[in-house]
Amino acid sequence: MDDVEIPEYFICPISLQIMRDPVTAITGITYDRESIENWLFKGNNTCPVTKQPLPPDSDLTPNHTLRRLIQSWCTENASNGVVRIPTPKAPLTKSHVVKLVKELWVPQLQLKTLRKLELLAMENERNRRYMVEAGVVKSMSSFLVACFNKQQTVGLEEALSILYLIRVNPTSETRLIPIENDRIMETFTWILQCKMDGHSSIKAHALLVLKVMVKAASSNQLERLKPEFLSSVVGVLREGISHQGINAALHILLDTCPWGRNRMSMIESGAIHDVIEIELGMPERRTTELILGILFHLCSCADGRSQFLSHSGAIAVVSSRMLNVSIAADDRAILILSLISKYCGTCVVLEEMISVRAVSKLCVVLQADYAHYLKEKAREILRSHYDFWKNSPCFISSPLSKIQLI
């Protein structure tokens, strides 16, 4: 294949690959359908070659003659390792999507229709855009509520997968399901609490959809979330769902815990113990950053600090992540230790901070290339308990002096 010279007019100007489904734009330039549609869907409104105006809804005419020439050339060069491109399927039309949406409410066609829509959503951005325009988001949310009303789980996984696949930009006119819809939130709470076959993948899909919904919600909407919803998100963390599902749940908790009412709901649900247990499993960097962010918010209140300290590995795991993960993780770890040492600085806690090397790492922060505010926070912790720690090995072996801590 590498030794075969490909005719120049077989190559898409965007992808620089052989065109599989050549279409001609109104400017007269031919592109591969997938490449030019992705170009338009990303908000570009000019022809990549001529720079002439090219509206997103402009006609793209299939170039059947060129496609047959490409297929014929592929066949002639099969002995050189060239694989013949298949004849492309007819592109999805909005009318076909509308027809499928109507079939969704025919009981005997329901599951088959959901699977068709899921496959279409997996194929390409064009299909997903047509599905949004045809009202699939609203139909899927109505289907989920209907499942909740009937306590029916058949089709849940497909419907949630479709919603996740066609998730839209929160700033666009076609926003995802509004989080202020009480019936929708009751439905998602039920899904997360439900015991059912294949529950892990269903709940993971639900969390991925909720993550987008929460990200798009306003402050007023987030501070009115019901405790039952937040406790159901926390509860899923104990069930051993997929890594992607765990991260989605952590994103939801982090985005909602700045509000005091939400923090209390999470603490009462045992969120601190659950996220510490996940962290003890040594997850990837992004998961650690999410967990430390949640712990920081929850430790900002007395009940949170009490629950944090009731876990025997809490201080140790936070200390172990300092200087070992990322700047973002260091930031949160130092702020957590600051809250604990300031409000719960008992002899037992201060002694543990020495034994798990938290104190020695704070000394390193003062000497390393860290942001000024982090150095100041580390200095504040060390200065506050200098009299307790001054005879510990980490202070004796460190070039830091009391003067440097003032």
Image: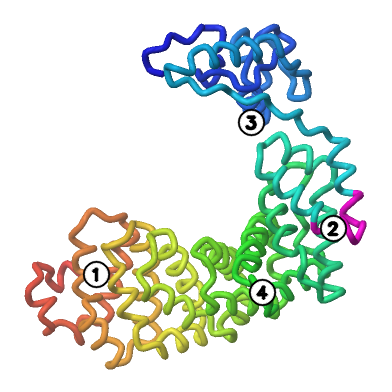
Query: Going 24% across and 69% down the picture, which residue do you hit?
Result: 362
Q: Secondary structure at mark 1?
A: helix
Amino acid at the residue labelled 3:
Lys
Q: CA distance from mark 3 to mark 2?
A: 33 Å
**Label 1 sits on residue:** 362
Which callout, 1 or 3, points at the residue further toward the start of the chain?
Answer: 3
**Residue 103 inside the magenta-drawn segment:** yes
Q: Are marks 4 and 2 in contact (CB under 8 Å)?
A: no
- Residue 308 position in % (x across, y down): 43, 84
- Foreground residue, 5 or 295? 5
Which callout, 3 or 4, points at the residue further toward the start of the chain?
Answer: 3
Q: CA distance from mark 4 to mark 2?
A: 19 Å
Which callout, 4 or 2, points at the residue further toward the start of the chain?
Answer: 2
**Label 4 sits on residue:** 197
Q: Is residue 193 above or below residue 283?
A: below
Indicate left or right for 85 with 379 as reference.
Answer: right
Amino acid at the residue labelled 1:
Leu
Q: Is residue 144 above or below residue 99?
A: below
Indicate left or right for 111 with 311 as reference.
Answer: right
* Residue 108, picture quadrant: bottom right
Q: CA distance from mark 1 to mark 2?
A: 59 Å
Indicate left or right for 385 with 226 as reference.
Answer: left
Which-is-in-front pick, marks 3 and 2? 2
- Residue 97 position in % (x across, y down): 84, 41
Query: Going 13% across and 83% down the picture, which residue do you hit?
Result: 392
Amino acid at the residue labelled 4:
Asp
**Label 2 sits on residue:** 110
Which-is-in-front pick, marks 1 and 4? 4
Which callout, 1 or 2, points at the residue further toward the start of the chain?
Answer: 2
